[in-house]
Image (cartoon, grey):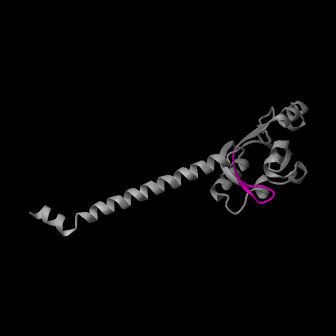
């Protein structure tokens, strides 16, 4: 069986996808990307060749546990799907959902990985906005409850309670 990266039919199809696609060797070093990958992150295929994607794309606010999970999946030849914060070549952060799958030959030997990514920054901003709204409503309810509890301690109300 011809390695997937050498299959020109695959490359032609993957180049037409709007989702970024990245392929690595069995050790996690980039061997191919499609044009959607460059559009998303700003790095050309030539810049990525021979690099581990995480070393180029992850940054100061990338969750370390997620980055470690990705690394462990590659080390152990396992599939993984995660949301992770990456950084564009110009430094702009963006969220992606990435599904990474091992590629095996006819003998079940690991030959590399394929990552198919989907940009999810808008989804993450919407979730953050909803979380902020929930916190605001919760705080308002707490303040309202505190106000109601304090009114019970006003002397007139105390007389009503004690008769």
Quick check: is 113 in the magenta stretch?
Answer: no
Task: Return the x and y of residue 118 as percentages of the image width and height.
Answer: 71, 42
Query: 15 and 64: which one is in front?
Result: 15
Residue 74 visible here: yes
Residue at x-position 37% and y-position 59%: 142
Q: Quadrant of the C terminus?
A: bottom left
Query: 71 and 57: which one is in front?
Result: 57
Query: 68 and 157: which one is in front?
Result: 157
> Does 64 sit left or right of 148 as displayed?
right
Quarter assignment of residue 162: bottom left
Task: Return the x and y of residue 132 as percentages of the image width and height.
Answer: 52, 55
Query: 56 and 35: which one is in front?
Result: 35
Q: Is residue 54 above or below residue 1?
A: below
Residue at x-position 82% and y-position 51%: 29
Task: Return the x and y of residue 77 as percentages of the image width and height.
Answer: 72, 44
Count of numbered badges drawn on the protein:
0
Task: Return the x and y of residue 69 as percentages of the image width and height.
Answer: 66, 52
Quick check: is 93 in the magenta stretch?
Answer: yes
Query: What span is colored magenta in the figure?
Result: 86-97
> Does 147 sit left or right of 16 as displayed?
left
Q: Quadrant of the N terminus?
A: top right
Quarter assignment of residue 108: top right
Residue lying farthest bottom?
155
> Does 51 sit left or right of 156 as displayed?
right
Q: Is residue 43 above or below residue 2?
A: below
Residue 25 visible here: no
Residue at x-position 81% and y-position 42%: 36
Residue lying farthest front?
156
Q: Is residue 146 above or below residue 96?
A: below
């Amino acid at each position: 069986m011809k390695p997937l990266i050498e299959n020109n039919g695959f490359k032609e199809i993957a180049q037409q996808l709007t989702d970024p696609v990245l392929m690595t060797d069995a050790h996690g070093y980039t061997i191919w990307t499609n044009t959607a990958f460059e559009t998303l992150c700003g790095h050309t295929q030539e810049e990525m060749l021979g690099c581990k994607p995480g070393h180029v794309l992850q940054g100061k606010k990338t969750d370390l546990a997620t980055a470690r999970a990705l690394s462990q999946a590659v080390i152990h030849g396992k599939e993984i799907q995660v949301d992770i914060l990456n950084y564009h070549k110009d430094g702009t952060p963006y969220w992606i959902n990435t599904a990474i799958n091992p590629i095996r030959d006819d003998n079940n030997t690991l030959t590399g990985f394929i990552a198919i990514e989907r940009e999810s920054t808008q989804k993450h901003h919407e979730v953050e906005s909803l979380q902020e709204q929930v916190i605001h409503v919760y705080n308002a309810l707490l303040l309202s409850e505190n106000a109601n509890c304090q009114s019970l301690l006003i002397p007139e109300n105390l007389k009503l309670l004690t008769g």
